[in-house]
Image (cartoon, grey):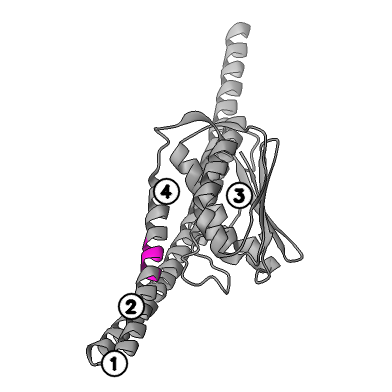
Amino acid sequence: MTALIIAVYVLLITLTALIFIFLSLKHGVKEIDRQLPEILQGGTNRLITVSGDDGSLKKLAVRLNESLSTLREKELKYENGDREIKTALSNAAHDFRTPLTAINGYLDLLENEADGEKREKYLRVIRERTDTLTKLSEELFSYSVAVCANRRKAEKLDACAVLKETIADFYEAFRAKNITPEIRADGQCETVADRTELARMFSNLISNALKYSAGSFSVTLEGRTFTFENDAENVDCIDVNRLFDRFYTVKNGRNSTGLGLSIAKLVCERLGGKIGAELHGNRLKIILTI
């Protein structure tokens, strides 16, 4: 009889404990169920909290908070990307419309002009505007190629050698601006990359320097870090902080979509490297580590 009473007491205690656990779990689930929609709809940085001491519910809350944090990051990237695309489309439309308007205007003038000297002048302007459109189109195409590249042709190569080959391709451009490039990169920098992508990255960095340089250009290699340096009188600290933003151009960056440095950053990060810019007086430094 005594044993039966003890068994009943144990059963009652067990049932009470189970009911308490059940009610605690139910309360915790209701807390999560109430908070989750509010957080999702409110767009706040609040975290889900549970008042009970149940370990499994606390683990669930932690995992939900981690998922919410990831979701917020993706939403922010989407919002920034959507805003950036709208700005980019507006800028691109303006960049293309300006030379097209000029071309149409000079074609009208050319059609009704009999003076040979004036006709040659109009043709020269049309050629210049056509070249501008070509450059803009090439930058947009290069960016789309860079975004879609998949490194299937990755190979072990010397980045320093690729750099020197790329600089040699700009010989005429340097000579046209009366710039003698200084190359202090005598060592080797082995990496695994697509040769075309690596050359495109270096090419865009050199093109950027040529576009804004006031008369000098140098490249230095220390370990695995390349430093591209040039005079840049028209660049300020605000410009430097945004140089790698897609579709951003400094005030005197005409005939450009601003994609060159963005492509360089994209390729660099795909190689597992990092890139940044510094301004010291009127000297601009692009620092690239691969």
- Answer whether labels 1 and 4 touch (C-beta < 8 Å): no
For the C terminus, the image quarter is top right
Q: Secondary structure at mark 2?
A: helix
The amino acid pointed to by label 2 is Leu
The image quarter containing residue 251 is bottom right
The image quarter containing residue 66 is top right
Tell me the magenta residue range.
132-137
How far, Cα to Cα, is label 1 from label 2? 24 Å
Q: Residue at x 62, y 31 (%)?
A: 55
The residue that mark 2 highlights is 100
The residue that mark 3 highlights is 47
- In the displayed structure, 242 sits above or below 3; it is below
How far, Cα to Cα, is label 2 from label 3? 53 Å
Residues 148 and 198: in front is 198
The percent position of residue 122, horizontal first and vertical second, equals 34, 84
Instruction: From the viewer's perspective, tell me whether residue 272 is left or right of residue 281.
Output: left
Question: Which label lies toward us, 1 or 4?
Answer: 1
Mark 3 or mark 1, which has the lower sequence index? 3
Q: Residue at x 66, y 66 (%)?
A: 232
Q: Secondary structure at mark 3?
A: loop
The residue that mark 1 highlights is 115
Instruction: From the viewer's perspective, tell me whether residue 245 is left or right of residue 255.
Output: right
The answer to whether residue 108 shows anywhere in this view is yes
Residues 56 and 15: in front is 56
Instruction: Work out which residue is located at the far left of the displayed protein and give it.
Output: 111
How far, Cα to Cα, is label 4 from label 2? 27 Å
How far, Cα to Cα, is label 1 from label 4? 48 Å
At label 2, counting other C-alpha atoms closer than 10 Å, the crowd grade (few under 14, some 14-19, many 20 or more) is some
The amino acid pointed to by label 4 is Val
